[in-house]
Amino acid sequence: MYHRLRFCILRVSIYLTIAVSLSAQGVEYSPGTYRLTPTTDLQLQPTPVQVPARFLGEVPEGLVLNLPPGFSVKLYAIGLRRPRQMAVGPDGVLYVANMKRYDLNENDSEIVALPDRDRDGVADTAYVAAGGLHMANSLAFHGDAMYVAEADGIVRLRDEDGDGLFEQRVVLVKDIPARGWHTTRTIAIDAEAEKIYVGVGAPCDLCRSERPFDRATLNPLPATPEWGSVLQFDIDGGGRRIYATGMRNVVGLALHPVTKQLWGTHNGHDREGPDLPPEWIDIILEGGFMGFPFVYGYRVPVDFSIDLYRDVGILPLTRQDSLLIESQRRPVALIPAHLAPLGMHFYTQDRFPEQYRNAAFVAVHGGQTGGNLAVVPGFKVTALLSEPDGSEARVADFLTGFGTDDKGSHVWGKPAGVMSDDEGFLYVTSDHRLNAVFRVEATPLSASWSLDLPDTTAIGSHLALVVTVRITRSDPDGQPPVVVADLSAVRGGAAVPLEATAAGVYELETTLDVHGPTGLRTIQVHLEQNADSQVHRVLFSQAMFVAPGADVRILDDELADGWRVTSEEGTEPPRFVSDGPVFSGSSSLALRVEPPSFFRNWSVRLQPQEPVVTEGYTGLRFAFHPNDVEAPTVPVLAVSIDSLTVDLVRGPLGPLVDFRRQEWQIVELPLSAFDVPYQDAASRHDAVSVMETLVFEGNVSGTLHLDDVRLVTPQSKPPAQTAVVEVAGSTDRPSTISLSQNAPNPFNSSTLIEFSLASDSDVLLAVYNLAGQRVAVLTQGTRPAGAYRLFWEGVDDTGLEMASGVYLYRLRTGQQVLTRRLLLLR
């Protein structure tokens, strides 16, 4: 308690000091806070990975990555064990550090050469240029020498006889600290100043360099100020000095081509939950302090009330600590927590469009998946676009798709390194699952587009389309580009030409009527240019969700057209009656039911002539009246869609019907409760959910009535006279923490979210956008064990309606975090 109080006082004093000293600097956000860097949309498009014939059968079929229009990606090399950072040698050959294992006791790392002598964009071979290295993570060239960063030193190698093998080996630097965590080393060389830079990670999650310990064992380690630093050496290995401090694990290092300043990427600590701390990409200045282990973001204090952090010897903070904290600069860029940015490279060639000149490409190794704290999608290459001094920074996803879904549950690749060659091709390594090198190419044809397309529209609406394509680069020796739109997904033409309205500008304005079925519809624009027997192509595509325009009526006074009703053994043929309970209109469907035996239920089947597409509908709603039903001791009444059943009496949604109430009861079931199956389609992306049968079954006896059976849209409201069955949260102590899928989902006006606590807990239930930014707090504070339910109306913390889109809602209790997705459709 004493430590915590003292830390709170120190935290306040830090805020006051830095607020006074920097209040006049006009920074974008204040000390003691942080903001994620704004993002830029590069209009990524699904792009099939080109797999050379000799690699077929060695990689999964149908690999697709997402790139900006005008880019393609090819598998350059496979068969490596753990490819990490890369460098291009004086001979133009791409070399990669094949680290193989994270093992301080092994010297099995190697540098692999990947030459492309026939210039077909694929490595001709892969051979070991230098072996027997100690956890070699990165390399760099200077003059005729290769410099390799091992876990505990720097090795200089030369190929004296020109056979491609680097036989001469000199240890330039040794005894770099290499114990505990973060033992990979990254090297960067300032060729003009002839200086070498090497990043040295801290051995722990959070500790002082003067009181280090091995995070794996908590055993003390030898103290040295080199923990958590960047070291600088002369090109011959002499002049060893600490260049900058305050880094838990700086991984990517690169010199800016204009300013020659050293930049780096950083991985933050783990124990402050899924949202903290943000990772940084920043300029590392000589003598600079980057925050670790005291602060993160822009001088935001670490939470030392966390048990592990309170007891590792960081507190109390000294006057020198406070001065270091006051010296920390606002980072150039911050990205969501736990994304683990690794390799970093500044692009200087002109093969890519001009906006990428001097941009920093960063390999993002982490993301949302099992075993990773991150809660936003990752596993990608990000482009950092800024002025040379780091101002006006924006981050943009450049290469994504290494996970087969955006939850990252099936990740087939993790970017680790990024590098370009002298011709301007970009290379990316993956050191997970598919250990490979990819080559990204840009065509001579590039363009941007805008499409005034809503996120969602309803069947029966009129869709006004305005498409504009602006060509930013084309082949000067080629023919005039041709631009056509494929509107077939919305019942338009498959090749509608865009009209040239200005130099390099093409436009299309049209109006279309929106027809069914519901689901995603993709509009594409194809841009082509013929040049010297080659065809340069750029594809733009954007998806829109076509929502239902109205409920699907199944029965009211009669069955809807195309539907039929049948009964199984023990049930009389259903009939519409007007002399019994009627919910709406003039009649209801009466079911005279009796189980055929003690072990079997009766059932009534409603079936359409053709499967009904359920995409975009939120639930099944019907009116139920028990009339003279007699229920056994253990009653059963259930509803099934295509053999997927919801128990209306004892199911997870609670008791939704009451046989004792002689009145109409409205039951609305979210379709997500049925996990409606997908109809076969050419690809899962084109698949739609359908309903082929609707079955009511049970073991009660007598006559019950059904009325107003329908599939409902998010906008649908129950009739005003309806008494909706409400189910109170359970007062029983649940056995585990749980977070239910919201219902309905998608939703328009409001949605129900339920969660349960196995013990008294501090709770935070909040909604986040896909950038990881919190937009709404639903509930917060200490809650006793039990089950809880709440309704959210799709508004942010200021009460403003939020835009349509996919959001994450997350329940956090102590160290436990549960996350689900929801879809808001306005």
Image: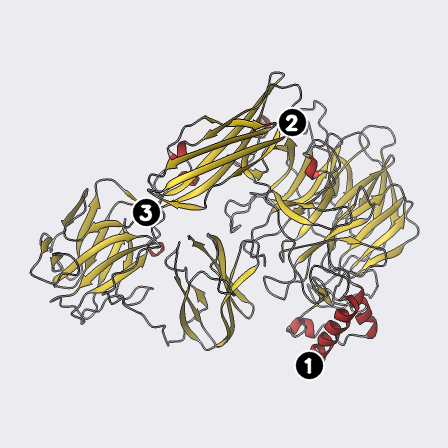
The answer to whether 22 is drawn above or below residue 690 in the figure is below
The Cα–Cα distance between marks 1 and 3, rounded to whole angstroms, is 59 Å
Residue 451 image position (x, y, % from top left): 50, 38
- Is residue 184 visible in the rendered image? The answer is no
Which dot marks residue 549?
A: 3
Looking at numbered disc 3 in the image, what kind of residue is underneath it? Gly
Q: Residue furthest bottom?
A: 2
Secondary structure of the residue carrying tag 2 is: loop
Circle 1 residue: 5
Looking at numbered disc 2 in the image, what kind of residue is underneath it? Pro
Nearer to the camera, 734 or 753 = 753
Label 2: how many Cα within 10 Å (few below 14, some 14–19, many 20+): many
Circle 2 residue: 444
Which dot marks residue 73?
A: none
Q: Residue furthest left?
A: 579
Secondary structure of the residue carrying tag 1 is: helix
Looking at numbered disc 1 in the image, what kind of residue is underneath it? Leu
